[in-house]
Amino acid sequence: MPFYPLNENNILDYLQQRPALKDFFPADAPVAIREVGDGNLNFVYIIENQDDPENAMVIKQALPYLRVLGESWPLTQERARYEAQALQEHNKYAPGLAPELYDFDDEMSTIAMEYLGKHAIMRKPMVAREKFPRFAEHISSFLARTLYFTSDYYLSGPEKKLLQAKFVNEELRKLQEDFVYTNPYKESEENNWNPLVDDEVQAVRADTALKLEIAAMKNSYMNHAEALIHADLHTGSIMLNQEDTRVIDPEFAFFGPMGYDIGAVLQNLVLNYLSHYGHTPDPEARADYQAWVLETIREIWNQFAAKFDALWAENARPDSELMPLGYWDYPDGQEAFAAYRQRTIQHILEETAGHGGVKFLRRMMGVVSVWDISSIEDPAKRAVAERAAIHIGKRWLMERKAISSIDDLIGIVQEETKDIVV
Amino acid sequence: MPFYPLNENNILDYLQQRPALKDFFPADAPVAIREVGDGNLNFVYIIENQDDPENAMVIKQALPYLRVLGESWPLTQERARYEAQALQEHNKYAPGLAPELYDFDDEMSTIAMEYLGKHAIMRKPMVAREKFPRFAEHISSFLARTLYFTSDYYLSGPEKKLLQAKFVNEELRKLQEDFVYTNPYKESEENNWNPLVDDEVQAVRADTALKLEIAAMKNSYMNHAEALIHADLHTGSIMLNQEDTRVIDPEFAFFGPMGYDIGAVLQNLVLNYLSHYGHTPDPEARADYQAWVLETIREIWNQFAAKFDALWAENARPDSELMPLGYWDYPDGQEAFAAYRQRTIQHILEETAGHGGVKFLRRMMGVVSVWDISSIEDPAKRAVAERAAIHIGKRWLMERKAISSIDDLIGIVQEETKDIVV
């Protein structure tokens, strides 16, 4: 069957052609269809049985261009396959923390998956200061499990390489290479930034020491094939409520540095923290929510580190490639294995700081900001948050090799915001 | 055509079935066939026109098991494809420094290539103290050109990833993961070592600090996808004479750290240097040859570094991924670009020391030594060389982050051999 774009009129006929989907809705159910894609890349339909809202699914179709920039920016539809493959791995290793996958149609670049009708995209409620008490627990499990089980710390060398070979993903990786690690720091027409922080932006673009470290992180992003990373794990890729958390939209997935995913989560939380200088005029309400955000950051890292270490200690196999258990089979071997795990986790923290740091900068001077910040209407208030974000980003990046715990990264956030009066 | 093993009786018929090969020899030429494979993995036939020795070719066929260990060690025949693909890249970027490729037959796992009748495998003449005055010039060009042009310093992100996707090579990489970075440092039945250095070997296997660094280098080997490396570049993979140098046998090729290839060359030269404590009793002859070896090591690195820097400065493109030229387009940008090149080359030196260091150790206590050393008949004299090799290997590895030039690595060789009296 050749490719054609789905729409509200043809999508039910499409479902009838897919064995995994055709019996999803009762024959005479009154189904409602709506298109809700608010991302940059795809069209997303929710199909719902109006008699039974639990009976619903999401259909996501990748079109052959970048939605946000229109048909002038072509993109292959391979990304639907990468998303489907990543969802499979996420469901395998972190069941309940990603939407269930019902069907993948390679020719139509279409994925059918669980509808998360009781979940909200995390970014907006965080601007409204909603707290999510189980988020740190859930996201740290998602990170620890998806990253550990797709790394050489669990897999054998050949298993890892054969899985890696399914995630070439050269086009979407190129988008991040350009829009995270390159274009924001040079003249590039799609960049935009608040004129009130122009001094900071121009300083970044002319700061050789900083640009060498950005280049080092780009090299890590491109060539440190540590685990299957989500690679776009901002708060717009997380849907949650008070009880449940799901990570969505893994079409950027490839084998890269674990710190990129963790850094994305932590850095997006800090951007939200900063956004409340604009969104939350009441100092008490602001301080209360900001304290929750920082505590969540601390918990995410500390729980990640503990879970990752425990998963590794419990699941490492005789043929796990880094390192096979027999490598530690000598009198001091168990202490050595523990030291190896701790050294690795410390390196993940360093890369978390480095990638997170770069991502602060790109959000302030590249093609896309985040809604937390861009929705601050007063440019002067927005500049307060943006200036702090640039300072924090620089320091996370430049000081990453000296960081010994998450408290150091949180300390930088506190230092760079302690004099802010709005 | 299904696979069948070639032999002296059927190989001429085989040539007739290959369009690229059938007219290679004149119809009535008296051709001689001999099998000369002395490696671990393959059968190699030389086919020669006895009336015209310039009219000759090599046919190399991969069989479905590891030759050195017999049919009990199965290996897929994919390695012939990896070798053919790597030879293509080597001929593209370093023409004249690898054998010319005539034909590749995927079904038969067979490669036809230039016969190097005037070249010798480097290992043996080096034991006989033959000097090769152009070797440093040639091998440094091979390294600089094959590594630069297959890296992100030249290619765009997508170009690199699509090339990389052709070199999954999970089986041969696993061999090196096991036999270079794992098994020698633990109990493993195939290991063998000189009982006279048993104290050193046992100390390595129980040295946690050292084993953590070996694990770090294994991680680099596996996951630092820097460039298309040869991945088996010892002096048994180099054929040369006084005028000409060719790198052969790239079936292990994959995208890994540049320092692995450079470290292999330098470390094999040092092993040869050490072997003369056994092979060359005359102190003057020994000192003379050892001085040439050390000077060659210095020249290889220094010429590599200069050539790599110049290739990069001259060939970097607007879309080279690390970094696109526009990234350096600001007032201090040219100095920054030069600093980036130098920092990268310094990191290659660090990885050269690390990978080279591990490879010293594995040759002294793993499954295969090198002929330079193993051919020393007196175990006591062999132990002199082996003990020094272990000391040098440990120091290259452990001190790699403090090394600032090739002279530091050479200095370690000199320090660890200055008290040797044989």
Image (cartoon, coloured by chain):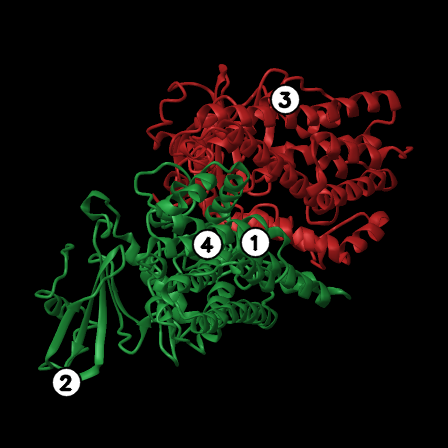
Chain colours: A green, B red
The residue beneath circle 4 is: A389
Above or below for A412 versus B273 = below
Q: Secondary structure at mark 3?
A: helix
Check the residue under mark 3 and report the chain it is in.
B
Mark 4 Cα shell of 10 Å, populated few (<14), some (14-19), many (≥20): many
Residue A271 at what x, y percent from top left?
Answer: 43, 60
Residue at the extreme bottom of the image, as rendered: A51
| Residue B120 vertical placement versus B38 (above, below) | above
From the top left corner, tell me how far across and down residue B118 is, in percent: 58, 19
Disc 2 is placed on an element classified as loop
The residue wearing badge 1 is: B73
Q: Amino acid at mark 4?
A: Ala
Q: Residues within 10 Å of mark 3 (few under 14, many from 20)?
A: many
| Mark 2 on the same chain as mark 4 | yes
Looking at the rendered image, the disc whose residue lies closer to the viewer, 2 or 4, is 4
Residue occupying the point 57% across, 45% down = B67
Secondary structure beneath disc 1?
strand
Badge nearest the viewer, 3 or 1: 3
With respect to residue B305, does B358 lie above or below? below
User: What mark, if any, has residue B135 been given in the picture?
Assistant: 3
**Placement of the C terminus of chain B among the 4 image quadrants:** top right
